[in-house]
Image (cartoon, coloured by chain):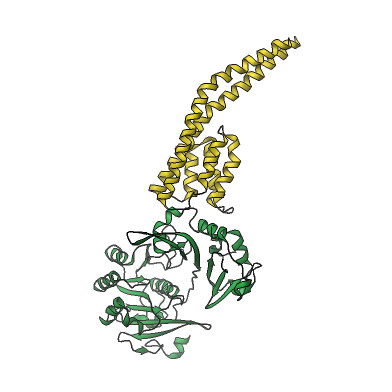
Chain colours: A green, B yellow
Amino acid sequence: MDPNWLSVFPDRLRHLLQKLPPSVFTRLEEVRIRESRPLEVNTGGRFYFLTADGGITRDAEAAFKPDKQDSSRLLDLITNHSLYTMEEELRKGFITIPGGHRIGLAGRTVLGGGKVEHIRDISGFNIRIAREVCGAADQVLPLLLDFKQKSVLHTLILSPPQQGKTTLIRDLARQISSGTWRHPEARWPGLKVAIVDERSEIAGCRDGVPSYDVGPRTDVMDGCPKAEGMMMMIRSMSPEVMVVDEIGRPEDAEALVEALHAGVRVIATAHGADIDDIGSRPVLSKLVDSGFFQMYVTLRRSDQGLTFRLWDAKRRGIPLIPPGMKGREADA
Amino acid sequence: MLKMLGAVLVIAATTLAGWLQARQYANRPQQIRRLILALKRLETEIMYGFTPLPDALDRIGEQSGGAVGSIFHRAAQNMKPPDNRTAQEALQLALEAGWKTTAMKAVEQDIMRQFSYTLGTSDRKDQLGHIATAVRQLESEEHEAREEQNRYEKMFRSLGLLFGAFIVIILY
């Protein structure tokens, strides 16, 4: 069966993508369409251009180039023929389609009062294919447990784009909510989890119902600005753990502090290449200096798969063996 | 006797033809009005409902009913999978397929075709502008159609009968 993201492509592009070798197709992460320039696909850090007969090449000259009709058809399909329903999305520069796949847009912006109001003449698309990887958090979760409080530690996950942050916190939310702690001594039930999903990426909600498995005790506030959503969740849904993606604005930090005082554990992600990077980011550094986060995780993806490193509240690297578990148990 | 029967048949046929033609004149302004109302509903759906086009057109098709309604239904159908046509193609195909069943003329079809080029491809303000233009043009066509109705509807109704009588007199 074809994955659901294929249905947003116009026939011509869809046929080309279907002709890709299975080894590439199943690992597709991004499909990039730029009008009258080569059609590009990305898999785990590598890129290829597509030729007109569905082969792959690195030669830009030999590649298939989508034309104006292709891009206007694509836009028509991803907006469900109704660009006017996407004004907010166009302001932000991306559209999330059913399944949590995100489509970034580039074109000419229209300004209103100095702010971006709209994008027109859209000619660049980046379709980021979201994949649910159940078990992505298996190795990390045992290290984030708070045995005293029978909960999880305040955690910040740092990585550059495209390394699997969202996949990781989606799985964390699922496992925390269902209470699979992956640790022999952790024997408390699942917790109430609240996800504030500003870009509909974590839960991939469709009509308000998550399309990914985010666990049985998880509430999702979909398409809501993070700071506001966190406050709403704290007030109304009494979460024990809050999961948010990509914090970075001053109001996000305020809401996080509010969550701390409300006794809610927070698992958040932020863009950043390394643990030392966050010192130079105004909002994040304030949070770090105040000792808010008890654990930092940095992600890196290589051909072997996802690797991660952990750092404690004082930003000292710590070993990857959970407390109370021997090395061999952790491997198993 | 046979002659008599023929004469009756001729008169019946021409009367019917005239009657049908008269009905076309009566239906045209009515259908244009329906089209205008449908577009105004679309305006509401876009402005206040943020309804995606396929759903909006389906709803409008239901409310409008008749030949006009089925055009919108068909357009909505064309947009949905498995066809997945663009809004423009979907509406144009629906117009081509359904226009023959209406009493409207090529001018109105042209207005709708023009309208299809911008359907769904811009922000709300822009969409409303295009709908308003189409509605204005249709309104002027409606006005003309009403005048034609006043002028020709009765005429054709009696002309059919008279023409039949004329043929019968000549042949008798």
At 48% from the left and 63% from the top, the residue drawn is: A99
Q: Could you tell me how many numbered marks the image carries?
A: 0
Q: Position of residue A23 (x, y in %)?
A: 61, 75
A285 sits left or right of B117 in the view: left
A72 sits left or right of A223 in the view: right
Q: Quadrant of the C terminus of chain B?
A: top right
Q: Quadrant of residue A318?
A: bottom left
Q: Does the rendering let one see residue A146?
A: no
At 32% from the left and 81% from the top, the residue drawn is: A280
Q: Nearer the viewer, residue B106 or A95?
A: B106
Extreme left residue here? Answer: A261
Q: Quadrant of residue A311?
A: bottom left
Q: Does the rendering let one see residue B61?
A: yes
Please say if B71 is above or below A163.
above
Q: Nearer the viewer, residue A101 or A123?
A: A123
Please say if B125 is above or below A269.
above
